[in-house]
Amino acid sequence: MLSIIIPNFNGVEHLKTCYPSLFAQSFQDFKVILVDNGSTDESVIYTQNSFPQIHIIRLGHNTGFAKAVNEGIKLSLQDSKIKFILLLNNDIELDHEFLQAGIDTFVNNNEASFIATKMLNYYERDKIDDCGDSIRAFGRIPFARGYGEKDVGLYDKGEFIFGASAGAGFYRKEIFEKAGLFDETFFAYYEDIDLSFRAQLLGFKCYYQPKAVCYHKRGGTTSVATHGFQTEQCERNLLLMRIKNYPLSLYIFFQPVFFIGRIVRYYRFLRDHSLSIFLHALKGYLRGTLLLIFQLPKRFRIQRNKVVSTQQIKMLFTK
């Protein structure tokens, strides 16, 4: 059985597209958990009236993505029938064979511990939104593979990659039992990169399945470059993700690259956007720096338990 976890905050209009595509799937052995982050719209009422089979977890306020999905994951882990977990954003419409493609990948490929899917732009369906997550060469910033590119067949081959977007990613339940849940310190952004990194250090592999297609309503105004809150969160969480997960030799070796990359990004924020965006980035960096010491116990635990070599991790980074 598959457990599908949908975090939600005031997303009733998105749910009206997401739910029908979900219950029209060719694969039907699943249960759905809506984790509502204190919505003030009709998300909960709509779900109760239109899809009463959905289990609802109500949180009193907006706890962020990580906390919300963790509540759903905890509930799923208590059910012995559940073998796989799908994390799904509320602003997604699924292709008819999406679930079947994910399940078939697990059944036919024992090395696939979690699965990245082919996410296309909801409004421009010949444009790619995300074909799995990666980290640029020399350990630079994380990125969504193919984002903004035309879908002309470059991402039609299944392959092992760094990680999966938690906006539409499949996971064997063992991932969460052994690597742990999402780090709630992150609140939002890069929490899926952090989990993918931890999973890779434990020897779990991520497989990109291009046959699992969905359509995501990612908005251009929510990009890192133009949204203050997201910019701040990404700069903060980038520091936390690195201190936790990079093997010591790579962490030290990449410090000059990290420094230069940050200078370049901040220059571009000032040149191409605004002083406000620059200040949000600087605030995020300072907040992350203050939190680094609290990440050290997590780092010691993660690095003590890793089973792969530093070279294997380095090879995961995309050129």
Image (cartoon, grey):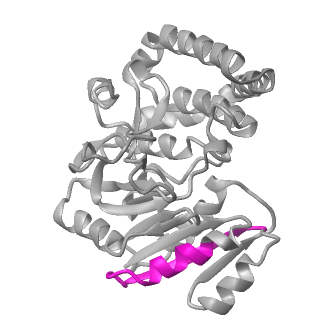
Magenta stretch? 15-38
Residue sitting nearer the eye, 207 or 203: 207
214 displayed left or right of 219: left
* 20 with respect to 27 (left or right): right
Write the residue at 65% across / 49% down: 184
Residue at x-position 46% and y-position 35% = 143
Viewport quadrant of the C terminus: top left
Q: Is residue 316 magenta?
A: no
Side of 12 where 97 appears, left or right: left
* Residue drawn 81% across the image and 68% down it: 60
Does the magenta run of residues contain 30?
yes
Q: Is residue 295 above or below residue 247?
A: below
Q: Is residue 142 above or below residue 48?
A: above
Q: Residue at x 24, y 63 (%)?
A: 105
> Looking at the image, which is closer to me, 190 or 89?
89
Using the image, determine if residue 150 lies above or below residue 67.
above
Name the image quarter holding residue 281: top right
